Image: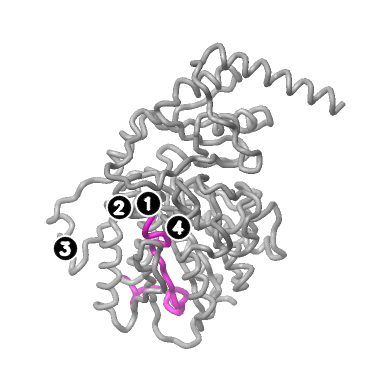
C-alpha cells in the first residue's frame, strides 16, 4: 500500500513539474532548500550596505487553502522555488508573500497544481505607502507636554524612548527607566518600570517588537502603558498593585531598519559573521529547546535561530535582567502580529503544560471580554505549538520553563490578514483597547496567586 501511494505521489509531481515547465519561462529555478526548513522559507537577507529603501512594487499577499498534504507540498515548493515567504498560517489556510518578479511564474505553478488562491493585498508597496500617515510637527506636539507620541501614527525609536523618559520625569514616584543592555548596533534596550512601591507587589513583564516589521506591537505596548499611567488614580487595585516591566521594542536595530530601509524586515541586525546574510530571529534565540522544530540553521532563513541559545545581545540582556531581578514574576506577556491569537506554552512542540486547562480558561475569558470591548474582533485561544505551528526557542516558552511564570502568553494582534504586517495606523487605538482588556484580565488572575 505504501509503495502504491508513493508511486502515485511521484507521478503527480512528474506531471506537475512537466506542466510547470510548459507554462513558465525556461529560466533556471533556484535549488530546493533542505526539507528541515520547509516550514518557512530560506530567504536571502543581504547584509551589504543599503543606501535606498527596499521597494515592493507589484508584490502581493496570497491566501491559499492549506487543508491537505498535496496543498502543503505545493506551498513548500512555492516557497523554495520562488523565494515566497510564509507570513501566517493555521490549520486551513496560509498567507504567502510573493515578490513582484515572481508573480507570473508562481501563478503558473499554482494553476498547474490546480490550487486556487485569493489575492489579499494586490500591491504591497501601495499598502506600505498608505499605512502610516505623515504628521506635521505642530500636530505631533499639539496638546502634548514634552513628548511626540500620538497613537495615530507609528513612531520611530527616538520618539518612544523620549516618551519613556518623559514619563519618568513627570511621574518620578511611579515611573522609572533602565537600559538593560545594548543591541548589536549599540542601541539601548530600554525598560519602563511602573510601580507604586508596594513591596508585596507581583510583577508582570510586557514586551513588543521582537520582530521588526510588526509595528502594531510596540504601538500597542506603549498604548497600554500610557493608558495605565495617565489614569493611574482611577485604576483598580489589581492593576495598581503590580510592578510592571515594559520593553516596548525588543529589537531596536531591526525596528529602525524596517522604518528606514526595509518595511518587511523581521530579524535583528546581527549575524554578519555567518556570511552574506544578516539577522537572527530573536524569537528562536531563547534558550529553552533552542534549535528544535520551526527553526533554521541557515543564516539566510527568516527563522534562523543564531549560533546558539542567547547568542544575540538582545535576548541575552532580557534573560539576564529577568533572572537577576528581585521581581516576583507572575506574568509574561509578549505582543506580536498578526492573526488575532492568544497563545500559551508550549510552542516548541504540540504538547501542553499540566495546567493548560487553567491557561485556556483565562485566555478564553480574555478573548470574550476583548470581543465585547471591540464589538467584533475575535481572538483564537490555544497552545502555540498546536494552534499555529511548533517553533522552538521562543521567549514565552523560556519564561515558563526558566522562571516558572504561570501566565506566559503570546498575543498575535490584529488583523486576520486583510492588511497583514502593514496594518494602517488608524487601527492602533482599537487594537490597543483590545490589548488593554487582555492585560486587565491577566492582572486579575495574577492578583489571585
From the image, state whether disc 4 or disc 3 is nearer to you: 4
Q: Position of residue 234 (x, y in %)?
A: 35, 74
Dot 4: element: loop
Residue 100 picture quarter: top left
Q: Which residue is mark 2?
A: 154
From the image, state whether disc 2 or disc 4 is nearer to you: 4
What span is colored magenta in the figure? 231-254
Q: Is residue 321 above or below residue 259?
A: below
From the image, state whether disc 4 or disc 1 is nearer to you: 4
Q: Which residue is mark 3?
A: 143
Q: Position of residue 76 (x, y in %)?
A: 60, 33
Of the residues under marks 2 and 1, which one precedes in the sequence?
Answer: 2
Q: Is residue 325 above or below residue 69?
A: below
Q: Is residue 147 above or below residue 53?
A: below
Crowding around mark 3 (Cα neighbors within 10 Å: few <14, some 14 to 19, many 20+) is few
Q: Is 224 inside the magenta-drawn segment? A: no
Check whether the beta carbons of the residues at disc 2 and disc 4 lie within 8 A of each other: no
Residue 92 in view in this figure: yes
Residue 140 lies left or right of residue 24; in this view the side is left
Q: Position of residue 155 (x, y in %)?
A: 28, 55
Q: Which residue is mark 1?
A: 215
In the rendered image, the residue lying farthest to the bottom is: 199
Of the residues under marks 3 and 2, which one precedes in the sequence?
Answer: 3
Crowding around mark 4 (Cα neighbors within 10 Å: few <14, some 14 to 19, many 20+) is many
Of the residues under marks 1 and 3, which one precedes in the sequence?
Answer: 3
Q: Residue at x 31, y 48 (%)?
A: 425
Residue 426 in view in this figure: no
Alpha-carbon span between mark 2 and mark 1? 7 Å
Q: Position of residue 261 (x, y in %)?
A: 31, 46
Amino acid at each position: 500500500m505504501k509503495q502504491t501511494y508513493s508511486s502515485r505521489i511521484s507521478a503527480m509531481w512528474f506531471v506537475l513539474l512537466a506542466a510547470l515547465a510548459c507554462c513558465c519561462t525556461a529560466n533556471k529555478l533556484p535549488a530546493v532548500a533542505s526539507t528541515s526548513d520547509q516550514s518557512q522559507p530560506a530567504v536571502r537577507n543581504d547584509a551589504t550596505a543599503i543606501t535606498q529603501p527596499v521597494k515592493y512594487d507589484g508584490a502581493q499577499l496570497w491566501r491559499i487553502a492549506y487543508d491537505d498534504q498535496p496543498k502543503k507540498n505545493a506551498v513548500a515548493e512555492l516557497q523554495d522555488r520562488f523565494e515566497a515567504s510564509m507570513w501566517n498560517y493555521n490549520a486551513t489556510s496560509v498567507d504567502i508573500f510573493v515578490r513582484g518578479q515572481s508573480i507570473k511564474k508562481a501563478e503558473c505553478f499554482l494553476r498547474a497544481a490546480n490550487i486556487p488562491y485569493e489575492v489579499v493585498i494586490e500591491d504591497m508597496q501601495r499598502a506600505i505607502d498608505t499605512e502610516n500617515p505623515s504628521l506635521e510637527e505642530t500636530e505631533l506636539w499639539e496638546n502634548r507636554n514634552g513628548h511626540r507620541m500620538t497613537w495615530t501614527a507609528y513612531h520611530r525609536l527616538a520618539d518612544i524612548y523620549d516618551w519613556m523618559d518623559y514619563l519618568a520625569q513627570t511621574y518620578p514616584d511611579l515611573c522609572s527607566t533602565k537600559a538593560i543592555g545594548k543591541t548589536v548596533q549599540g542601541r539601548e534596550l530600554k525598560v519602563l518600570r511602573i510601580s507604586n512601591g508596594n513591596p508585596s507587589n507581583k510583577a508582570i513583564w510586557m514586551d513588543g517588537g521582537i520582530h521588526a516589521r510588526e509595528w502594531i506591537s510596540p504601538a500597542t505596548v506603549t498604548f497600554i502603558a500610557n493608558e495605565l499611567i495617565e489614569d493611574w488614580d482611577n485604576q483598580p487595585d489589581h492593576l495598581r498593585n503590580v510592578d510592571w516591566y515594559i520593553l516596548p521594542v525588543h529589537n531596536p536595530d531591526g525596528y529602525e531598519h524596517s522604518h528606514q530601509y526595509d518595511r518587511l524586515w523581521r530579524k535583528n541586525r546581527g549575524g554578519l559573521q555567518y556570511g552574506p546574510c544578516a539577522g537572527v530571529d530573536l524569537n528562536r534565540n531563547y534558550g529553552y529547546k533552542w534549535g528544535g522544530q520551526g527553526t533554521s540553521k541557515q543564516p539566510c532563513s527568516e527563522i534562523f535561530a543564531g549560533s546558539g541559545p542567547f547568542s544575540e545581545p538582545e535576548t541575552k540582556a532580557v534573560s539576564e535582567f529577568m533572572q537577576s531581578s528581585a521581581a516576583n514574576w507572575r506574568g509574561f506577556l509578549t505582543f506580536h502580529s498578526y492573526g488575532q491569537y492568544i497563545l500559551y506554552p508550549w510552542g516548541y512542540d504540540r504538547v501542553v503544560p499540566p495546567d493548560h486547562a487553567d491557561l485556556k480558561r483565562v485566555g478564553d475569558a480574555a478573548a470574550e471580554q476583548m470581543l465585547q470591548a471591540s464589538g467584533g474582533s475575535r481572538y483564537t485561544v490555544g497552545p502555540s505549538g498546536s494552534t499555529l505551528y511548533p517553533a522552538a526557542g521562543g521567549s514565552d516558552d523560556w519564561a515558563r520553563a526558566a522562571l516558572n511564570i504561570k501566565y506566559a502568553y503570546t498575543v498575535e494582534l490584529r488583523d486576520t490578514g486583510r492588511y497583514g504586517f502593514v496594518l494602517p495606523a488608524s487601527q492602533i487605538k482599537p487594537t490597543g483597547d483590545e490589548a488593554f482588556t487582555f492585560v486587565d484580565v491577566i492582572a486579575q488572575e495574577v492578583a489571585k496567586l
